[in-house]
């Protein structure tokens, strides 16, 4: 690789290298960037688009699917934006950098792929109206965020899916202001957890028609973690009775910080503050040279929730520029259902 190519690689990876501090640099200084404040007035479709004066942002979609073959599958499609400085510019002067992750998880195997891009040159970006998020040939797009088509591919997989929202957007924390630490770090955070999904997975053994349910998370901030927080365990669970749960545990030197949102079938939300939920690892799996919890006991006494959450495919490791675990899970106990689990910092 010649010196010019190495320079481009270093430019592209600069924010990823900084993200290694406090997992993904999310506990680093927000100097010069905007920071979330309470009582933000969300406006759509504007806020489906990018917020370049904030340091970090993502469009994060996961889906639990069932194939015409009767087997369960999971997919991930994620576009991350990271800013070198709080502004936007055309061409190579743009300080915005983009990273895409895509994955398909089968009961036996986890396939994943990654894309990197500099902003300002048309290779990656997000437009709010009509909605389109893309990096290279990967895309999530539609007339708005209620009806979108989704496409991605890697060396051993591809998928083309159509998603239609069957419920409203939901806002986490205090009307979308999601606190992440006792020190008050926060993000803006809303979700569309009511997507119905249908389409086709292209896998080494052939094409599989699938249907299921998807969950989109939208989040942006400039310093969402405290400096001592090293990673998180994040759950999005859809129960067979129609209720849903978003819950997370942030691990830090001063102890865990937790939060949750209970989502009723009609989209009514109940925010649950730090300490409301408990997360206890039951079993670990040796993945990529580390021990990763792949079975959990999750309780939420305020809602009578007492469940075991188990990975469908324990080695669903994303060996990307910054590594993490991401995959579909099953739920049994007081509630039954399916969902997704993300774990970072292990």
Image (spheres, helix red, strand yellow):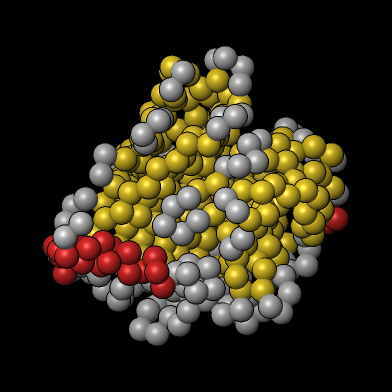
Q: Residue furthest top?
A: 69
Decide which of 174, 66 is in the foreground and name it: 66
| Residue depicted at 41% across the width and 47% down the height | 101
Q: Nearer the viewer, residue 332 or 47?
A: 332
Q: Quadrant of residue 207?
A: top left
The residue under the point 44% across, 52% down is 320
Residue found at x 40% / y 30%: 156
Q: Is residue 98 above or below residue 63?
A: below
Give coordinates of residue 74: x percent, y percent. 55, 34
In which quadrant of the rendered image does the N terminus lie?
Answer: bottom left
| 105, above or below 23, in the image | above
Instruction: Pick the quarter of the image with the C terminus.
Output: bottom right
Q: Position of residue 26 (x, y in %)?
A: 49, 71
> Residue 334 placed where, x, y %?
85, 40
Residue lying furthest bottom in this view?
A: 31
- Asked whether, in this view, residue 251 is left or right of residue 151, the answer is right
Q: Residue at x 32, y 64 (%)?
A: 13
Q: Nearer the viewer, residue 169 or 338?
A: 338
Total marks shown come to: 0
Q: Is residue 51 above or below residue 281?
A: below
Q: Is residue 290 visible?
A: yes
Please provide percent x and percent y for residue 305: 82, 48
- Camera sees residue 195: no
| Left or right, 268 with reference to 283 | left
């Amino acid at each position: 690789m010649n010196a010019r190519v190495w320079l481009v690689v270093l430019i592209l990876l600069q924010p990823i290298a900084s993200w290694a501090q406090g997992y993904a640099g999310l506990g680093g200084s927000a100097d010069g960037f905007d920071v979330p404040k309470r009582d933000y007035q969300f406006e759509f479709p504007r806020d489906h688009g990018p917020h370049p004066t904030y340091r970090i942002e993502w469009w994060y979609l996961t889906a639990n699917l069932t194939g015409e073959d009767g087997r369960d599958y999971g997919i991930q499609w994620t576009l991350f934006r990271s800013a070198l400085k709080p502004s936007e510019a055309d061409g190579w002067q743009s300080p915005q950098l983009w990273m895409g992750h895509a994955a398909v998880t089968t009961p036996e195997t986890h396939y994943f792929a990654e894309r990197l891009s500099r902003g300002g040159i048309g290779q990656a970006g997000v437009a709010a109206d009509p909605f389109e998020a893309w990096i290279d040939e990967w895309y999530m797009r539609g007339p708005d965020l209620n009806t979108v088509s989704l496409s991605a591919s890697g060396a051993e997989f591809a998928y083309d899916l159509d998603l239609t929202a069957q419920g409203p957007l939901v806002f986490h924390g205090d009307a979308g202001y999601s606190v992440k630490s006792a020190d008050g770090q926060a993000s803006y955070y809303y979700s569309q957890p009511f997507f119905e999904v249908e389409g086709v997975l292209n896998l080494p053994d052939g094409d599989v028609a699938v249907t299921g349910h998807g969950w989109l998370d939208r989040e942006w901030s400039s310093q969402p973690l405290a400096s001592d927080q090293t990673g998180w365990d994040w759950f999005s669970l859809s129960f067979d009775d129609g209720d849903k749960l978003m819950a997370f545990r942030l691990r830090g030197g001063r102890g865990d910080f937790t939060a949750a949102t209970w989502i009723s079938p009609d989209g009514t939300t109940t925010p649950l503050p730090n300490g409301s939920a408990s997360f206890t690892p039951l079993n670990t799996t040796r993945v990529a040279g580390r021990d990763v919890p792949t079975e959990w006991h999750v309780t939420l006494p305020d809602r009578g929730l007492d469940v075991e959450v188990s990975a469908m495919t324990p080695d669903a490791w994303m060996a990307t520029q910054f590594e993490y675990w991401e995959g579909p899970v099953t739920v049994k106990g007081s509630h039954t259902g399916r969902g997704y689990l993300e774990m970072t910092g292990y």
